[in-house]
Image: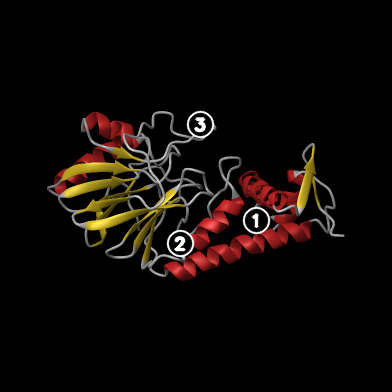
Amino acid sequence: MMQAGVLETILPGIHRLVAPNPSVLTGPGTNTYLLGNKSITVLDPGPDIPEHVEAIVAAIKDLGGEIERVVTTHTHPDHSPGAAELQLRFPGVPVIGASIADDGHQDPRFAPTSGLGHGDCFTVEGNIVRAIHTPGHVANHYCFIDEANGCVFTGDHIMQGSTVVIIPPAGDMADYVDSLRLLLDYPMRYLAPGHGSLIDTPHAEVERLVTHRLGREATILAAFNEVVKGDLDDLVAVAYRDVDVSIHPIAKLSLLAHLLKLEKESRAIQHEGQWELIKEH
């Protein structure tokens, strides 16, 4: 049972705090990871909830350590706003992350002191942690692999017990599937998601997610047998009939992401919100 505000050591030198923001989209809450025992990196400081920021500060004190840096996987408001608060608490602490234009779903206060690129590294008590650019959920998303133990911090690229919502235009389904496949090139042993528990079958989980996304795509393609030409409401009712209708507003976001992927691949076309497949000649 994951409990907000309780510091848990999930692997040697890797500690987890759950923010008190449970919901349909966040599961038990956003995971903040404290890497190291003395020189501590705070990865995904979480939402701007005073109680959670206090818990991070208290956890650093309980570990007998000092904060060395703050790192973010991306700038959605349940992952990065705590960085600004930690900058106030610890003046001069570096914040590492990638910025993105605000599409109405980003953290407007995010102000990194260092940018981020694919393959960039930092060290945590001698262990190399490497950034992996994983666009898809959002274009500025990064995972991080602790090369000493093969633990990949996945942010919202992979969630335990749930699928990730892809919200266009910042989210891109084609990029997401490619980014999932990219992780298979790394020596993973664990996945430490932004929401949910540690996953110790990383390759199987990534392959399952790729299969799931491509399976949903096949279901959407099959939906055009019933809805030859239609809008998102028409298509979600058929392509997501296995999902409770209360989830359909969220499902429409992923449906649009799939349709845009098909459009990018010249397999579907839209006109004034009406979608249809491109017939092969």
Q: Which residue is mark 1?
A: 243
Q: Looking at the picture, how far across and down is residue 255, in whole percent?
A: 67, 49
Amino acid type, label 1 = Val
Q: How far across and down, in percent of the image, does residue 180 sit?
A: 51, 59
Q: 142 left or right of 12?
A: right
Q: Residues within 10 Å of mark 3 (few under 14, many from 20)?
A: few
Q: Residue at (47%, 56%) from the top-left corner? A: 158
In three-dimensional space, the C-alpha distance between marks 2 and 3, rounded to whole angstroms, equals: 27 Å
Residue 102 tag number:
3
Q: Residue at x 64, y 43 (%)?
A: 249
**Camera-side residue: 164 or 69?**
69
Q: Position of residue 250 (x, y in %)?
A: 61, 45
**Picture layout, residue 180 above or below residue 204:** above
Question: Whole-percent x and y of residue 237?
Answer: 74, 51
* In this rendering, position of residue 185 left or right of residue 56: right
Question: Closest to the observer: 75 or 113?
Answer: 113
Between 189 and 164, the one nearer to me in the picture: 189
In which quadrant is the N terminus drawn?
Answer: bottom left
Closer to us: 186 or 24:
186
Q: Identify the disc placed on residue 183.
A: 2
Residue 154 vertical position relative to residue 208 in the rendered view, above or below: above
